[in-house]
Amino acid sequence: MVKFIQSSDWQIGMKGGGLGEAGPIVRETRVDSIHNVFKSAEKNYVDFILLCGDLFEHNMVSQEEVKKVVSIFNQYSNKMIYLLPGNHDILGADCIYNRDIFSRINHLKILNKFEPIVLENVVLHPCPIFSKFVNEDVTSKIPDVHKEEGVHIGIAHGSIIGRIPVSNWEEVDLPIDSKCTEKKGIDYLALGHWHSFQTFEDNTGIARIAYSGTHEQTKYEENNAGHCLLVEIDEKGAKPKIELNKTGKLSWTCKEFEMKDASSIKELKEYFESIKGHDLVYININGELPFNCKKEFDDIIDFQGTLHKNFRVKTNDLNYLMPTDLEVSFNFNDPTLNQTMIKLKELLQDETDEKKRKIIADALTYFLRFIREE
Ligand SMILES: [Mn+2]
């Protein structure tokens, strides 16, 4: 029996650009959440830890950041760590793992050769990459182990071919054959590179290939990130037991919200209530909103911005409906104001470009606010 923790894509040193004030929080949390990977290993009495690449964002990450990670490695020194570099921390002359500090960690082995590592009842088959632009199967050098004894585990970094979202070999760097496990006779293939958890079944319906995904989500578009995997394989040929263990600390929410009419404001408020406490929120609001709801809408959005570590709103596809009260005649008792109103109304009626319509609608909102305040 073998039991291990699988993790990858820590991307330590990443900038977190576009996250504003949340950038530094996200960067710090990524380091902090590494503890959860090792705690999961301790709690489950695993045999070793497999790290499948891209632990650092690039090979020039500052020594300060490196020391933070090494310090965590040293706090959990009773489990062997097998570390395969990925495409961000690519092997070569500049490789971050060439730094002296890594050679001093007794319980760390950098997997920089195609040499199998023979342990008790288990053989690890590392598939190191030496270029970011490999275009042949990264796992091709794994030997045929159909007739070999023990549990055999491949470790690689790249993109599975033949399954969604990548269908062709030509489309991607670092391709990995989705039939690798049945071709080579290995029991399991541990993968890094994709940030969301995902498994792939062999031709008998058994999941033998898995991405753990990143231990802490890196951007809004990722689903099912923020875990490490606890993998248990009883014997050669047995079905691997793959368990998700939560490691991520930050909650990310990405949502499309369609406005239909004035009642949508109430629904929007209810939705925001339901995501209270979420750290990072990105909402794409589309559909149609009556123009007279715009002020309340703007106020709600304004306030939401104060409730989350990062709050991004996209309203490019939100259309403001011309209010009926603007259709009727009006008189501000001031010819300039009347003319301005007529002009803005005409502009809004004639404009078809959504972005421009939004700008005109904004102008109308401010204009009416100005009138009321007078
Ligand atoms: Mn990668």
Image (cartoon, rainbow, N blue to C red):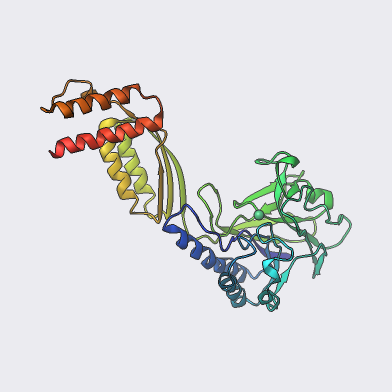
**9 or 135: nearer the viewer:** 135
Q: In the rendered view of the protein, which quadrant contains the N terminus?
A: bottom right
- Picture coordinates of residue 42, whole percent (x, y): 61, 71
Dividing the picture into quadrants, the one containing residue 243 is bottom right
**On the rendered structure, is 363 left or right of 111?**
left
In the depicted view, which residue is nearer to us: 199 or 169?
169
Instruction: Give the left or right position of residue 2, taking residue 371 as reference.
Output: right
- Residue nearer the viewer, 22 or 196: 22
Q: Position of residue 367 (x, y in %)?
A: 22, 35
What's the residue at 49%, 65% (across, down)?
A: 28
Q: Is residue 80 left or right of residue 366?
A: right
Name the image quarter holding residue 271: top left
Position of residue 97 measured from the top left corner of the image (x, y, whole percent) = 69, 69
Query: Is 17 placed above or below 13 here?
Result: above
Q: In this image, 352 relative to 218: left or right? A: left
Residue 235 seen anywhere in this rendered image of the structure: yes
